Image (spheres, helix red, strand yellow):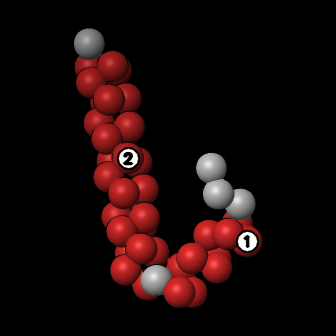
Amino acid sequence: MLTLAQQKYLYSRNPQLKAQMEKDREEKTREAARKEAEKSEG
């Protein structure tokens, strides 16, 4: 796990990396929400 300082440093040097991380986080959030929905339907 990176510290916030390390993340800011990496992102400032690599904007694509930041975009990728944002996308990954969105997908994980969406997936978690879907699993919760399935659980409540069950």
Q: Nearer the viewer, residue 40 or 19?
A: 19
Figure quadrant of residue 31: top left
Q: Residue 26 placed where, x, y %?
A: 37, 57
Q: What element carries label 2?
A: helix
**Residue that mark 2 sits on:** 28
Residue 5 numbered mark, or none: 1
Tell me which label, 1 or 2, sits earlier in the chain: 1
Residue at screen point 33% across, 19% down: 39
Q: How many marks?
A: 2
Q: Secondary structure under badge 1?
A: helix
* Residue drawn at point x = 42 percent, y = 67 percent: 22
Q: Nearer the viewer, mark 1 or mark 2?
A: 1
User: Residue at (62%, 69%) from the top-left corner?
Assistant: 7
The image quadrant of residue 4 is: bottom right
**Residue 15 position in % (x across, y down):** 43, 84
Which amino acid does the dot numbered 2 rest on? Lys
Q: Which of 36 and 22 is in front in this view?
A: 22
Distance, label 1 to label 2, CA atoms, is 23 Å
Q: Is residue 23 left or right of residue 2?
A: left
Q: In which quarter of the image is the C terminus?
A: top left
Q: Position of residue 1 (x, y in %)?
A: 62, 50
Bin the neighbour count of mark 1 within 10 Å (Cα to Cα): few under 14, some 14-19, many 20 and up. Answer: few
22 with respect to 41 (left or right): right
